């Protein structure tokens, strides 16, 4: 009797299948996050008449062929892309230099610089937009394309700087010393040794600036004047109906972003 | 001599840009908030403190509502973001980066477009509510849009990554052996979480809280798209006063009040916990 009992006790209990609640919770969150995206993509294929893209009427690809039907929408998209590219270049350059200074050197005002960058990252957009507009009003400067560009560089430059700084801190200073020992001047060392090592961070910072710029609505709305960017056009169109072209453009921008992100992950995995 | 100047020269363009277009404008706004006049007669500096009392009298309701919505959205973002970040950091194994990427992908769609897409998804006769009403699962007058929960959930939705990333960063870096040590010392799973994991992850929660609370409080896109007249937030007032009514002194005053309230939060955070964690997460 005791022997049988012992035997049962010794057999390991069959593994109880635990429901992984965490996994299902995370998947539900991802599902929630994707809900509006799925609708946006689906309705870029909606076969509707006119501009009211609310009820499903059937599948069509025609909006992809007629994506540039609204001249002012196309113009808005071009403004957005032009501003994003210029922001990437300007903020990418001056932000990288700032990041290099902060990561490599000790200088007077470093603490203040950090605090100002922190404030610029944390400050609400509506405050930055309102403040810039106040300045332009006080000085009598007109708003428009240049004002948007100034604003976008202003709120993205700190992001570039901290991205580059994070990389500079981890750089091996011995490599630069070695270059100098081998007779390279300061500029040659920077160009052939430091810059290539910083390039991934500079690219990442620049892309972040591009993404932040292309997406911005709030700050832009304050300083845009007569210029309409893509988010501003979409915002203005909500009252009269958003044409499927907007869904198409949103879907295409999303597709480019997703492709870049996936390539980035694959490259990062390869490098490991 | 040249070497001493190098950092200043490197930092100069970025510094100048931030000084000219971030710090000076805030000073300009303070100056504007103390003027009198209107758009036709022009604005004159009169150090008119009355603008502040007027702004507060008119809009304190919207200001408090914004703080309340911002706080609610932040708490919801913690409730949703923490378990997801925890699971990805501790349990997702080799799928870690895939799940993290999936969590961030929706944010490649423009902020305004995402919010408007919610509006269509949730509209009264739209694809979700309309269908549920047609099959009789919901009463015909049921509405999600134009309600406070719609706005708060929209805010939590749009700013979730700012919550998830800092928490994830802290949990991911945590030494998992401390949890094993807790179990070795006979801590239950709950005790190990409450007394070991949670305290270690709190700085991440604070950083995420700051990065969520500030933009949600000042946001007006969600309130305008998903809400109605009863859910107007302070950002919307600021935008209307600046761009539609051109009542700059009052607009500047109310913006300054909002900024002061949030800046107290920003700087007390920076003093207590340092700026590193927030900046480091942004750098990723």
Image (cartoon, coloured by chain):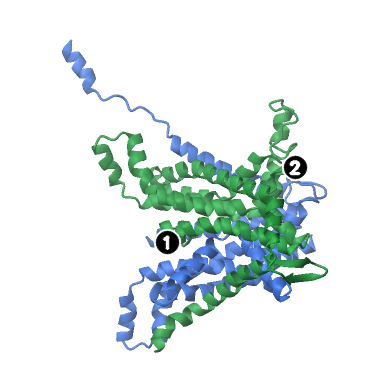
Chain colours: A blue, B green
Decide: few, some or many residues near mark 1? Use Cα within 10 Å; few <14, some 14-19, many ≥20: some
Q: Residue furthest top?
A: A1
- The residue lying toward the viewer, choosing from A169 and B68, is B68
Q: CA distance from mark 1 to mark 2?
A: 52 Å
Above/below status of A203 relative to B3: above
Quarter of the image where one finds residue B112: bottom right
Label 1: which secondary element: helix
Q: Do marks 1 and 2 share a chain?
A: no
Res A216 seen here:
no
Find residue A76 and report its horizontal and vertical position in percent: 73, 64
- The residue lying toward the viewer, choosing from B251 and B147, is B251
- Viewed as shown, does residue A15 lie left or right of A240? left
- Viewed as shown, does residue A187 lie left or right of B40? left
Look at mark 1 in the image and give the residue it sits on. B276
Tell me the residue at 26%/25% (across/down).
Answer: A12
Res B54 seen here:
yes
Find residue A265 and report its horizontal and vertical position in percent: 46, 57
Q: Chain of mark 2?
A: A
Query: What mark, if any, has residue B254 been given in the picture?
Result: none
Find residue A215 and report its horizontal and vertical position in percent: 63, 60
Quarter of the image where one finds residue B148: top right
Look at mark 2 in the image and give the residue it sits on. A58
């Amino acid at each position: 009797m005791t022997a049988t009992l012992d035997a049962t006790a010794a057999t390991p209990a069959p593994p109880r299948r635990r429901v992984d609640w965490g996994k299902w919770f995370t998947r539900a969150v991802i599902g929630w996050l994707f809900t509006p995206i799925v609708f946006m993509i689906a309705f870029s294929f909606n076969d509707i008449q006119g501009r009211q893209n609310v009820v499903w009427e059937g599948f069509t690809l025609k909006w992809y062929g007629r994506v540039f039907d609204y001249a002012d929408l196309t113009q808005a998209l071009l403004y957005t892309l032009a501003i994003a590219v210029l922001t990437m270049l300007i903020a990418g350059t001056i932000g990288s230099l700032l990041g290099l200074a902060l990561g490599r050197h000790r200088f007077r005002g470093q603490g203040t610089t950090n605090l100002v960058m922190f404030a610029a990252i944390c400050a609400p957009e509506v405050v930055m937009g309102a403040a810039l507009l106040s300045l332009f009003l006080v000085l009598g400067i007109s708003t428009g394309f240049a004002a948007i560009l100034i604003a976008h560089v202003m709120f993205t430059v700190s992001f570039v700087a901290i991205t580059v700084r994070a990389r500079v801190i981890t750089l091996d200073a011995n490599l630069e010393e070695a270059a100098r020992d081998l007779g390279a001047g300061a500029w040659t060392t920077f160009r052939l040794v430091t810059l290539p090592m910083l390039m991934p961070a500079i690219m990442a910072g620049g892309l972040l600036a591009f993404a932040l710029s292309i997406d911005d609505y709030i700050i832009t709305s304050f300083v845009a004047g007569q210029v309409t960017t893509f988010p501003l056009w979409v915002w203005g169109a909500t009252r009269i109906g958003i044409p499927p072209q907007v869904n198409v453009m949103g879907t295409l921008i999303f597709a480019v972003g997703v492709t870049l992100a996936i390539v980035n992950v694959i490259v990062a995995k390869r490098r490991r | 001599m040249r070497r001493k100047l190098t950092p200043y020269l490197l930092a100069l363009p970025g510094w100048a840009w931030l000084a000219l277009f971030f710090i000076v404008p805030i000073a300009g706004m303070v100056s504007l908030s103390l003027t009198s006049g209107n758009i036709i007669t022009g604005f004159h500096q009169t150090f008119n403190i009355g603008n502040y009392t007027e702004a507060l009298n008119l809009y304190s309701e919207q200001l408090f509502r914004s703080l309340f919505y911002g706080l609610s959205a932040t708490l919801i973002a913690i409730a949703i973001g923490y378990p997801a970040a925890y699971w990805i950091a501790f349990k997702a194994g080799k799928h870690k980066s895939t799940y993290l990427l999936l969590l961030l992908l929706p944010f490649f769609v423009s902020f305004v477009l995402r919010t408007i897409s919610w509006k269509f998804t949730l509209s009264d006769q739209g694809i979700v509510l309309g269908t549920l009403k047609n099959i009789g699962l919901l009463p015909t007058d049921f509405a999600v849009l134009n309600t406070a929960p719609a706005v708060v959930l929209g805010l939590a939705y749009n700013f979730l990554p700012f919550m998830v990333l800092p928490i994830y960063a802290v949990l991911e870096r945590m030494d998992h052996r401390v949890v094993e040590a807790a179990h070795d010392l006979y801590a239950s799973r709950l005790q190990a979480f409450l007394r070991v994991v949670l305290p270690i992850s709190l700085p991440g929660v604070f950083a995420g809280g700051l990065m969520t609370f500030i933009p949600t409080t000042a946001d007006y896109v969600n309130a305008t798209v998903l809400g109605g007249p009863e859910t107007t937030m302070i950002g919307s007032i600021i935008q209307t006063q600046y761009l539609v009514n051109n009542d700059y002194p009052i607009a500047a005053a109310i913006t300054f009040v909002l900024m002061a309230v949030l800046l107290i939060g920003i700087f007390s955070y920076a003093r207590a916990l340092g700026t590193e964690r927030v900046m480091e997460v942004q750098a990723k």
